[in-house]
Image (cartoon, helix red, strand yellow):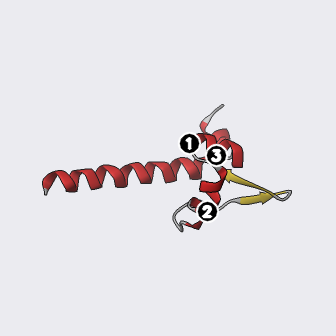
Amino acid sequence: MNKQETSKQLIRTKQLCKKLCISTTTLFTNFMKDDTFPKATKIGGTNAWFEHEIDAWLDQQREKQINNQCVEETV
């Protein structure tokens, strides 16, 4: 699968929860209320997310965590 195909790939709730290592309850009660978390797209009444948007969000979360660790180490 090339990069262009990956960027358009949709993942459903079960796949997303597995990718994030969270339960569906956590997804719907915590993550989807977070304004920075990518919005789901409805397909036939089912939630789906663009995988590249989830990957970008994960990268941002990692970057925030790294920056917070660096700040804590300098204090």
For image coordinates 28% across by 55% down, the residue present is: 68
Quarter of the image that includes the C terminus: bottom left
User: For the point 14% across and 54% down, which residue is it?
Assistant: 74
Query: Which picture quadrant has residue 44?
Result: bottom right
Q: Residue furthest right?
A: 44
Sooner in the amino-acid sequence: mark 3 or mark 1:
3
Q: Position of residue 4 (x, y in %)?
A: 64, 41
Mark 2 in CB contact with mark 3 (< 8 angstroms): no
In the foreground, 4 or 57: 57
Query: In the image, what residue occupies the spot 63% across and 33% down?
Result: 2
The residue tagged with tag 1: helix, strand or loop? loop
Mark 3 is on which residue type?
A: Leu
What kind of residue is marked 1? Cys
State the separation of the CA atoms marked 2 and 3: 14 Å
Mark 3, mark 1: which one is toward the viewer?
Answer: 1
Q: CB atoms at circles 1 and 2 under 8 Å apart? A: no
Query: x and y percent of residue 10 in the render?
Result: 71, 47
Q: Residue 21 carries which label?
A: 1
Q: Do the residues labelled 3 and 1 touch (CB within 8 Å)?
A: no
**Amino acid at circle 2:** Thr
Q: Residues within 10 Å of mark 3 (few under 14, many from 20)?
A: many
Residue carrying label 3:
16
Residue 61 on image: x %, y %: 43, 53
For disc 2, the marked residue is 29
Q: Which of the 4 image quadrants contains residue 47?
A: bottom right
